[in-house]
Amino acid sequence: MGRVGKFGSITTRMLVILAVAFLLMVMMVYWVIDTQAKPRISEMTSETVVETGNEVINSIMVSINHVDGMAKATSAVAGGLPKTAESYQNTVGNLMQQTDQRIVGGGVWFDPNMYQDGVERQSFVWSRDANGKMQPTERYNSNTATPNAYYRDWWYIPAMYASHDHCVWSRAYIDPVSNNPMMTCAKALYNSQNQAFDGVVSFNLLLDNLDDAMQKWQDKVGGYMFLVDLDNRFLTFPDKSTVTTVTENNPQGEMMTASQLAEKQVSFAPIAASLEGVNSQLIDAAKQKDEGRYNLAARSILSTTNMNRISENESNLLSALLLLNVDQAFNLVNSHLVDTIDIGNDFILNEPATAFVFKMPFTYWKMVVVKPNSDLMGVANTLSDQLVRAMLFGFLPILLLTAWAFRRYFTDPLKNMAGSVSRMGKLIEQKQYQKLGEHKLPNSSVSEIQLISDKTNRLIDRVVENEGALAEINVHLEQQVANRTKDLEHALHELKTSQVQLVRSEKMATLGQMVAGVAHEVNTPLGYVRSNMELIGGNLTRFDELMTHTEALLIALNAPSTSQDDKNKLIAETLNCCDEIKEDEVSDDLAHLISDSLYGVDQIAELVVSLRDFSRIDESKIKNVDINDCIASSLTMARNNLKTLNVTTDLAELPAVQCNPSQINQVLLNLFNNAAQAMRQDTKGELKVVTCLDNEAGDNVLISVTDNGSGIEDAVLARIFEPFFTTKKAGEGTGLGLAICSQIIEQHGGDISVHSVIGRGTTFTIRLPIEVYVAPTHKKKTSKALFA
């Protein structure tokens, strides 16, 4: 039995399961918080921001409404006063002295010739000195001190065209004394007798307390807040230097617009676009109400203002405000939120944030609250952390209690049971069955474990009772196994004997075919050698006749008694015989006959050498062999069977292969003979033998034998290497040729494959390793048996 790992304990596994269940529960809690709680808490937090923003707007509107009411009262009082300097200085002067410190200036400004005929400028104006006390000033009545007339200034003209009973608030600018942002409330002054336009009443409101107010509310809400005026010019900002710019008209400096800041800070662009959208809605609403009056007021304000000190956009906004404020009412109930914007990375907070845009009635100031998303999610994150912490602290005691109870009532009894089973296992291995009764499983208070103990103990009793019978049966079975093993060994020996006999039979059949072919090949050159010898024998009689005439001539020449006539006659006969031999070209015929006979003898010698190379009787062991030589000798041996075929070879230069050449020759001869037998009668037979190296590995030799015979059907192709399978008629084949070929190639560590197309031919491919051949007796894995 293998050794149990650290997590093999049931207690450990149970604790792991509980821990996983707890983790799943925590993940579910996180999922609920992320998908349900966080969006709702974010929404609630946003609602809190909106409520706070409305509260800020209402608090500012109280101050704005106070100044607006003071301007209304001053306009009413000034419209009914006698047009004397004393009356205005006493009445309006006393009123200006009683204003709070945030009112830093103001007064009554008469239109030309409305105070007195021929008087172009007449104003009763007060401003605070360096000590904060209101002092009258005459500088605006002097052409020298103020070359540009006040009645064409950018804060005066809009009040003249106002058709409502409220202040017209100017854009924010910098107070030259306090260097703080300031705005002017301008209210039209009408003559109480004829209701004619006499001029404008103004109050200059210092906005220094707005920064403190914004900081107070900012500490409460979080993030940061700022105010912009009607033209989206900043009134407040966390860092005033960021939004302050010096212009030609205001060398003391003025606040820039939101669009100007967006050009410097790209992340501020969504807020600037939203603020511009609010103004666009204001202009669209004015055009929808009375486009004619709107266009007239816009052109008039723009054309009558000194030196283009008011822009076309500001003129359009003031015209819309003048037209729409007629219907405005001071309302502290309605929400002033107009837009909510997602900011990817706020340039002040340096993190993702959400901007809330609020609109202020009458002035159309806008307030923007920028709150980081981390604050919106802070409550949800804190809630989830506290919840998980509480779950963890509650889970640990439960986990420990469960581990103790599980170990006490389940794990320990199981360990005791496992110890008893282990001891019984050792007794069974030692075949000491009678001692099993001494190691029965103990009783347990757990019903399930007790049930296992009872069943196991009953099984032990049965084992002890049947031990004797089992021992007897075991002896009988062992005897039967021994007898069966002996029978199987005898059958295996007979099967191997039969296999050897069948292999020899197939070899003899192949050898018979080879001997018949060789005999035919030898008989042909032997026949014409015999014929040439007979012709040579006939020609040699002519030379015997010449020898007879020559010997008679020699005897006559040596005998003194021979007459000269007899000598001449013998000489003539000898010469005549020589001439006849020359005329019949007997010598040339003999040379040709001898040459042909030698050629026939060479053919016989070649067959003998090829037969010797094919059989390799002296080279039956494993050696390095040139496969191309094996192919050449095998083709020679099969030449009689291949004489009707067009045989072509494409033999590459190959390295020597470690193999048994006699066996390889047997395989090749079998494939060549099969190819010859597979040829169709209506087609000129072709046989092509190709050798090459394996391109993929380069350590194998490939031999392909291709014919253009009738091909092999798929059903036959699947069984072609099976022993005793043949498609030939009875008595024509044993069905062992290709089976033996396959076995030989496998014993050489290679393989043989076949590809065939009906009507086109068949290709056998042999793969032989170059240097990895291992003899069958030494191979760790035996080759496939010839008979399955």
Image: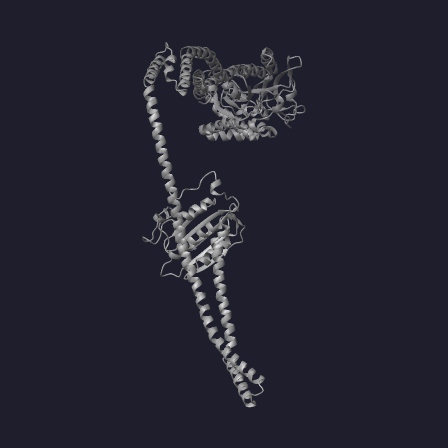
Q: Is residue 421 above or below residue 344?
A: above
**Rendered location of residue 770, percent (x, y):** 52, 47
Nearest to the observer: residue 150 or residue 713: 713
Decide if residue 695 is in sight here. Answer: no
Report the quarter where the N terminus lies.
Answer: top left
What is the number of callouts on the image?
A: 0
Residue 330, compared with residue 489, is above or below; it is above
Answer whether residue 768 is visible to the viewer in this image: yes
Residue at position x 60%, y 30% in the image = 308
Residue shown at 55% from the left, 90% from the top: 565
Which is more toward the observer, 622 or 366? 622
Front residue of 363 and 357: 357
Left or right position of 570 against 520: right
Task: Looking at the picture, tell me which residue is in the foreground, 544 or 289.
Answer: 544
On the image, the x and y values in percent for residue 771 come to: 53, 45
- Residue 429 on image: x %, y %: 41, 21
Q: Residue furthest top?
A: 445
In the picture as drawn, the residue positioned furthest to the front comes out as 561
Figure quadrant of the C terminus: top left
| Display coloring | one colour
Residue 573, given in percent of the width and then of the height, sits at 52, 85
- In which image quadrant can residue 235 be found? top right
